[in-house]
Amino acid sequence: MRILIVDDERLASRRLEILLARRPQYEVVGVARDGEEALQAIEQHRPDVVLLDIHMPGTDGILVSRKLAGPDSPAVIFVTAFEHHAADAFESAAIDYLLKPVSPERLDTALARVRNLIYLKDAQSRVGELESVVAALRGGDDGSQEVIWVRSREGMVRIPKRTIDWVEAEGDYVRLHCREKSWLHRETLSAMGKTLGDRLFIRVHRSAIVNKRRIVLSSTTGTGGRIVRLDTGAEVRVGRSYGGALREALDQGTD
C-alpha cells in the first residue's frame, strides 16, 4: 500500500517513517507538513492511505479528511496526541484513530483494517469485471458494449459512453469527465480512443478526447491557439495537428 504521512511535527513524522520502513509491504510516497500541502500531495501521489495529524497550521486534519469524500479518495487514519477529537474523526469516516506516540502494534492493526477494506473492494471489482465479460460474451441487448467499467474505491462503476463529456490523459491513466463527476481509469489515451470509437468522440489534442455532441464552440485564442468549449463550460485545447480533423468532424456532425 502507498502511504502519505501528514504531520507538522518532524519527530512524529520521522517515527512513522521509521516504523513503516521496517514493513516492506508499505511504501511511503511522501510527507506533508500542513493541510494544504497534504491535499496537493494526495492529488500528486494518489496514496491508498493517509496517516493524518489533526492539529496543524492552516487547514487542520479534520478539514482535510472532509475534502476527501470522493470515490477515489484515500483511506484516512488519524494520528494525534489528543483523545477528544475521536468523535469528529469517525464522523469524517476515518478508518482508525491512533494516539501519539504510535505503537508498532496499533499501527499494524490500523493498516490491516485498510488492507482488508481494499481486498474487499478488489473482490467486488473482480465480480463487476466478470459480469461485464459474461454480458459481452452473451451478446445480449443490454447495451453492455456501450459502457465502460471503471474501478473506484466502492467497486466497479458502470459508465455509459454517451455520458462522457471528455477524456484527458494523466500519466499512465485517463480521467473521464462526466458532468459533475470525474473518474480515474488505468488506460492510455490511445487505447481509450479505440474503446470509445470515432462516431461520438474525437481526439483534439495529444492529451484530450472530446464528445462531439458536447461541443458548443470552437474558437481561436488570443495567442493563436484553438480551443473547444463544451456545454458543461469546460474548455479543451486543440492541438495544431488535430485542427483539420476537428473542422471536418464539426462540418459532418454526428448521427
Image (tube, rainbow, N blue to C red):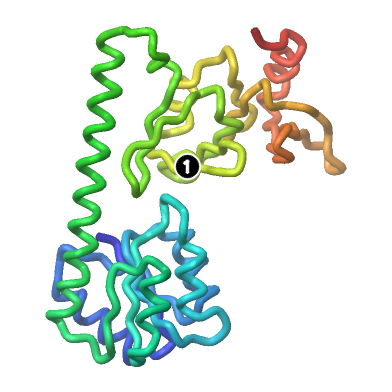
What residue is rendered at 74% in x and 40% in y? Answer: 233
173 on left or right of 179: left
Q: Is residue 45 above or below residue 8?
A: above
Q: Is residue 29 in view?
A: no
What residue is rendered at 68% in x and 17% in y? Answer: 245
The residue lying toward the viewer, choosing from 176 and 208, is 176
Identify the residue under disc 1. 183
Residue found at the very far right of the displayed protein: 222
Residue 239 pos. (x, y %): 67, 32
Quadrant the N terminus occupies: bottom left
172 on left or right of 36: left
Q: Is residue 205 in view?
A: yes
Residue 68 pos. (x, y %): 46, 62
Residue 29 pos. (x, y %): 34, 66
Secondary structure category for the residue under label 1:
strand
Task: State the image quarter where residue 102 is shown.
Answer: bottom left
Label 1, residues with CA under 10 Å away: few <14, some 14-19, many ≥20: some
Task: State the image quarter where residue 145 is shown.
Answer: top left
Quadrant the C terminus occupies: top right
Q: How many marks?
A: 1
Residue 220 pos. (x, y %): 83, 34
Q: Is residue 133 above or below residue 53?
A: above
What residue is rendered at 41% in x and 42% in y? Answer: 172
Task: State the image quarter where residue 181 is shown.
Answer: top right
Q: Is residue 234 above or below residue 129?
A: below
The residue lying toward the viewer, choosing from 159 and 18, is 159
Identity, as a three-letter code, of the amino acid under mark 1: Trp
What residue is rendered at 19% in x and 77% in y? Answer: 107
Q: Is residue 231 above or below residue 123?
A: above
The residue lying toward the viewer, choosing from 39 and 202, is 39
